[in-house]
Image: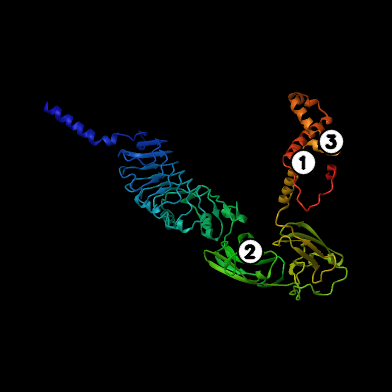
Amino acid sequence: MDTICRIFLLLLAFHKINSSVSSCVTGCSCSQDSFGRSLLCMSALLRQIPANIPQDIRKIRIENSHLTELPRGSFENVSALEYLWLNFNNITVMHIKSLEYLPALKELRLQGNKLSSVPWTAFQDTPALKILDLKHNRLDVLPEHALRYLPNLTYLDLSSNQLTVISRDVFYSWPVYQRSKRAAGQIEDISNAVLALHDNPWICDCRLRGFVEFIKSVGPPIILMNSYLTCTSPKFRAGKFFHEVELNSCTKPLTSALETNLTVPVGLNVTLTCFVQASPSPAVWWTYALKLLRAFNVSTEPISEETVRSELLILAARPADAGNYTCTAANFLGNSSEMISLHVVSPWSSTTSLSWDPIAPAEPGAHVQVRIAKQTVYGITLEWFAAAAAAADPGETWYTLLVGRYDAAQKDTIYIGPGVNTYSVTDLLPATKYEVCVAVRNQAPRKGQCVVFVTGSDVSQLEQREKLIHIVVIVCAMVLAVPAGMYACTAEARPGCLARCPGACLRRRRGGQAQAAGSKESTLDSLPAGSEDGLCQDGRNARRAPAREEPGKTRPPHRNSADLY
């Protein structure tokens, strides 16, 4: 009996010790295969690494389970783990100690996640790692020490990421590459290493020169899964293979300008041009009086592999636009700038006069036809056409516009450049008389080249029209309110109309409903009856309040009521 009890206690103790080994994670399945015991979690909605993974697990495959991070010590209970597949999750963060306690790990697959960076020093805890799959992530940087801690790596997949520029030193520091260089010319068995770098948006400029040279010269034991790497930018290299391009060394920007001192007349469109030689392509901007100029007035485009042209457009230059403009270019090696001085002067020397006095003798036949194209309360829009000699070369014809109040001794002068035949004058005072003249070049205004106008009142035409409509409506309502019989009575001018009022009133009261029933058949002959009814009431009111004559006043002569109309 004692022997049986001892055996039972031993079995119970053994079961408790190995309960964690024989169990499996809820929502997942455990199986035994050639790799050993495996844990499979497919679409399990775990959101984090399970804490109760059995210790005897050799392979973990958790896919489509919405994992978001790999925290520190995620697999500290499964130190015998050799294969870890975490594909197609939402992992964005990987802790630097997330692979701690995994010295036997041989394969790590993180395909189809959202990693923008990887803590490469984390692989110090996985010296036996041979396969690393990081394709279809968001990696955009590969530091120089990235492969230093992967001495036994035989497969590295970095395809379909966001890598743009890589230094060749990343691979020069890779132990696999270093062993191949040491074994060159010697009989030594070195395992091949497969490298996948395709489907990345490579920027083929001077920064990628070393990497391109490495790809061109790479050979066993390093094997490219796809050796036809292509350029994505700049535009003139987009779509080209690495073996088709020749990249130069990087250089600091060097700015220059064909003209550094410009003098232009008022009203002319001016384009300031700056050339920059640099590699890689620099960022270019313009400043004026220490202020950054608006980007939509600046255009920058490459004209060769290492030269760009930047242009600043100044529309209708004014004296206030004069000054020093600075073109600045910069890349990661440094910056450079070029200053261009702009002077804006009048197209003729004597245009400082603002009076109506003739500026220069008029050229015979030079005449301008002026008209008002549009007028508002606060301004007008003018159009003009230069005829005869002035129209011989319209591309070189300047105009002088004189604007001011009609009674002003001096007017404002506006200079209009070639090719412009319209101008809008705004900010005028309402209900004010103005005069505008247009002259060719430095000529004095002639007869017919001036327009006199009066700006509108501050009340809009719409408001005036509404007021007029309201008045018309009120007048019509008053007219319709007057009894129609008044018109008939006064038109006939019957002398006994007022005398018959009492009888007409009595008959209308007796008629009552009969008259209302026959009103549909009444004609214009019944109008006097209605008018007499209205006059009767007025007559009674008149008898109740007889007018008194004041002494000393003469009585006005009798007038027929028809004379009032």
Residue 85 visible here: yes
| Type of the residue with mark 1 | Val
User: Tag 2 or tag 3, which sits nearer the N-term?
Assistant: 2
Alpha carbon separation for disc pair 1 and 2? 76 Å
User: Tag 2 or tag 1, which sits nearer the N-term?
Assistant: 2
Alpha carbon separation for disc pair 3 and 2? 102 Å
- Identify which residue is drawn at 36% across, 39% down: 59
Quarter in which the N terminus is drawn: top left
Q: Is residue 534 left or right of residue 16?
A: right
| Type of the residue with mark 3 | Gly
Residue 524's x, y, as percent? 83, 31
Mark 1 or 2: the one toward you: 1
- Check the image and name the residue furthest to the front: 551
Comparing 561 with 213, the one in front is 561
In this rendering, the answer to whether 260 lies above or below 65 is below
Q: Secondary structure at mark 2?
A: strand
Q: Quadrant of residue 315?
A: bottom right
In this rendering, the answer to whether 388 lies above or below 539 is below
- Identify which residue is drawn at 67% across, 65% down: 314
| Type of the residue with mark 2 | Ser
Mark 1 or 3: the one toward you: 3
Q: Residues within 10 Å of mark 1 (few under 14, many from 20)?
A: few
User: Tag 3 or tag 1, which sits nearer the N-term?
Assistant: 1
Q: Quadrant of residue 513?
A: top right
Q: Return the residue at label 3.
A: 496
Residue 222's x, y, as percent? 47, 51
Mark 3 or 2: the one toward you: 3
Residue 479's disc is: 1
Q: Quadrant of residue 48?
A: top left
Residue 182's x, y, as percent? 42, 58
Q: Return the residue at label 2.
A: 310
